[in-house]
Image (spheres, coloured by chain):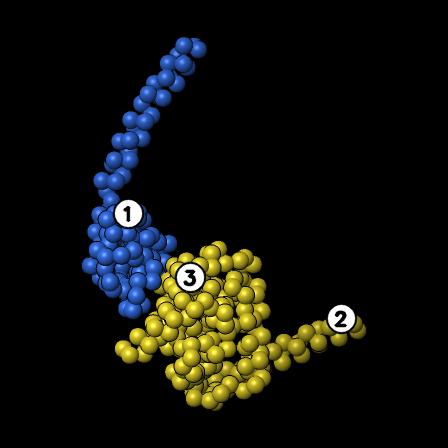
Chain colours: A yellow, B blue
Amino acid sequence: MRKQFIQGLLTGVTAVLVGAAATALLVMKLGAVPVNADKQPPVLEARLLGLALHASVARHAENRPNPLPTTEENLVAGAEIYAQMCAKCHGRPNAGPSIYGASFYPPAPQLATHPPQYTEAELFWIVKHGVRNTAMPAWGRQLSDENIWQVVAFLKRLDSLQPAVTAEREKRSRGAADQ
Amino acid sequence: MNRIIILLMALTAALGPITLSAALRAGSATEKVIRITAKKFEFAPGEVTVRKGEPVVLELTSEDRTHGFNLPDFGVRTEVKPGAVSRVHFTPDKAGKFNFACDVFCGSGHEDMSGTLVVTE
C-alpha cells in the first residue's frame, strides 16, 4: 500500500515537472516570452535576479581587502579607468544618470549617483568576471587585477575623495565629454 | 662493485647537465619565434598564425609605455615594458581564432587594443 502510494507520488511529481518544462518550451517556441529591452523589469523579476546576483557574488568573491594602498595615484588611475571604461554605462560623477546605461535590460546601475554597496572584494569579482545576461562584460580580459582594484578603490571612495583626485577626475570627465 | 656504482654516478653527474643543456637547446630550436610590438593602441602584427601542436615563443616589446598581453584561451599573460623583451612560451592545443588584448589600461583607446591568434590544424 505504502509502496503504491510512493510510486504514485513519484509518477505524479515527474508528470508535473515534465508538463511544466514542456509548457515553458512551448511558450518560448510560440514567441510569447518578451525579449524587448525598453521596459523596466517587473518588481518580482528584479528582486529575484538581484537576490541570485548578490548571493552568487557573495559566494564566489574572495573575502580579502584591496591589496593596493589608498594613494592619490591609485585613486586617480581608478578615476581615469572609470571615465574611459565604465562611465558611459554607469554614469559620470556630477553629470546625472546615463541614458545609454538606462537603456539596458536590466538597466545598468548608476554608480556615480548611487555608490555600490558591495564590498571591495565583491566589486573586484563583478568587474573581473562580469555578470551573465546583462551588459556587464568580464573586464578581466582587458584590465589587469591592479587596474580593477584601482577602479574598485575609486568607486568605494566616491563620497570622500581627496580634492586633488576630485579635480583630476572632473578634468578627465570634461575631457571625455568633449570628445 | 661499489667502484662501478660510484663511477656510474660520477659519469651521470658529469654528463647530466651537458645532456640537459643539449635537450633544452634542441627544444628551443623547434619553437616558432614570433615578434609582436605593442604601442597605443595596437599590436603589430594584429593577426598571428600558428599551427596546432607547434611550440611557440612570443617576443613582445613596447614602443611607448607599459602594456599587457593577455591571451586567456591559452592561459598566456605578461606585461610588456618599453626597453625590454617579454617572452612567453606556449603550445596551442586547439585550432580556431582566439583574441588577445592589452590588459594594462593605457588610455582612451585601450579597449580597442587587441589582436587575433589564428591556430590552424
Q: Secondary structure at mark 1?
A: strand
The kind of residue tagged 3 is Glu
Q: Is residue A45 above or below residue A167?
A: below
Gap in angstroms between the C-alphas marked 1 and 3? 33 Å
* Residue A112 horizontal side relative to residue B51, left or right: right
Residue sitting at x 58%, y 75%? A51
Gap in angstroms between the C-alphas marked 2 and 1? 68 Å
Viewport quadrant of the N terminus of chain A:
bottom right
Mark 1 and mark 3 on one chain: no
Gap in angstroms between the C-alphas marked 3 and 2? 71 Å
Residue sitting at x 37%, y 69%? A168
**Chain letter, disc 2 residue:** A
Work out which residue is located at the far right of the displayed protein and give it: A1
Tags 2 and 1 in contact by the CB under 8 Å rule? no
> Where is mark 2, residue-wise?
A3
> Where is mark 1, residue-wise?
B87
